[in-house]
Image: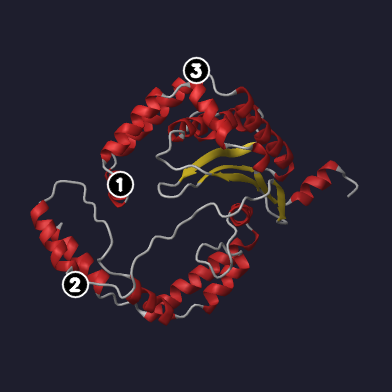
Amino acid sequence: MPAVIDILGQVLRVPTLPAEEFDVLKNERLAGLEQNRTEPGMLGPRLLQRELNSYASDDVRYIPTIEESIQRVKDLKYDQVAGLYRDYLGSQTGELTIVGDFDLKACLSALEKSLRAWKAPKPYARIMMPIKTEAKGGERQIVTPDKANATYTSGLLFALQDDDPDYAAMVLGNYIFGAGALSSRLGDRIRQKEGLSYGVSSSLSVSSQDKRASLTITAICNPQNIGRVEKAAQEELDRLLHDGVTADELENAKRGYLQALKVARANDPVLAAMLSSLRYLGRTMKFEGDLEKKLASVTPEQVNAALRKNIDAKKLVVVTAGDFEVKAAAANPAL
C-alpha cells in the first residue's frame, strides 16, 4: 500500500496530461453525445433535471441540452483542462480512505511524503445546491421517431436533509413505493400485474448539506403503453399519499432495507466510500448506527405523515419520450 500511495502521488502531482489523449477523449465524448440526440432514455431524464434545476447558462449548476453539450465540448481547449488541473487540485482539502489489512504508520508516512507542500492556487469551496425555484407540475413530451422503447420519467423537489427527523420514514416510504429490489407498489402493478413496463422504479435522493431532496419515478415501456404507465404511476402515488402504507408492508421493507445495508458494508469499495463521505461531513459510523436504529423503530403513522408532509403529487413534473406517432397510428389505423 505505501508503494501504491507513492505512485498515486506521482500521478496526481506530475500528470503527463498528453494532448493527443485529450483529442481522443473529446472525440469519444462528442460521439456519445451525438448518439444520445434521439435516445429517449437520455432526453427524458435530462429534460426533467432541467425543469427541476433552473440556473443561468453561465452557472456551473446549469444543465445544458444535448445540443449545448455538443457545442461546449467542441469549444473546449486542451489548455483550459490543463489550467483547471493546475489551479484547483492540491492537498489542502481531501479524504483518503483505506479498507483492508495495512500498516497505518507506513501509509501515513507515504501519504505525507507524497502530498507535502502540494498547494492549489485556488481555494476549495463547496458548490451549494439549494432549491432555487419551484417547477410547475405537469407533462412535457419529447417525440423520438423510430425508437422501439419509450421512457417515462417524473420527479419533484422538496426541502429535506438526511439528518432531519423525517428522513428514515421517507427512505422506507420510497422503498415500499418503488425502490424495493424484490417487491414494490410500482413494480407489482406496472410490471407484474399489468405488464406495461420492462422496468419501473422510484428513487429518493436526499442531500447531507442542503435542504434539498428529490423523488423520481422512471419506467421503460412500449410507446403504445406510455399513457397507461403514466396513469398507473400517478394513481399509485396518489394511493400512497391517501391510503398510506400498511404495517406488514413496513415490516417487510425494514427487513429488506436493513439487510441491504448490512450486505453493502461487507463490500470493501462500498465501505471505503461510506467512510470517506462520513469523514468529509464530520461524521462517524455512529451516524449510520443511529440511522439504522431509527429505521428499525419507524411506525406506519410516521411514514404516512412524512410522505404527506413532503410529497405534493400536484407538483410532479412528468416527461415522456418516445415514438408516440406509433401510438397514434395504432389508435387510429386511418392515420
Name above or below for residue 72 compared with residue 5: below
Image quarter (top left, top right, bottom left or bottom right) of the N terminus: bottom left
Q: 324 or 166, which lies in front?
A: 166
Location of residue 168 by image quarter: top left
What is the number of the mark on residue 240? Answer: none
Image x and y of residue 235, in percent = 68, 31
- Secondary structure of the residue carrying numbered label 2: loop
Relative placement, left or right, of 58 versus 138 is: left
Q: Amino acid at mark 1?
A: Leu
The residue at which mark 2 appears reads as 117
Image x and y of residue 51, in percent = 63, 54
Name above or below for residue 28 compared with residue 282: below
Q: Amino acid at mark 2?
A: Ala
Residue at coordinates 56% horizontally, 55% vertically from top-left? 132
Q: Earlier in the sequence, mark 3 or mark 1?
A: 3
- Secondary structure of the residue carrying numbered label 1: helix
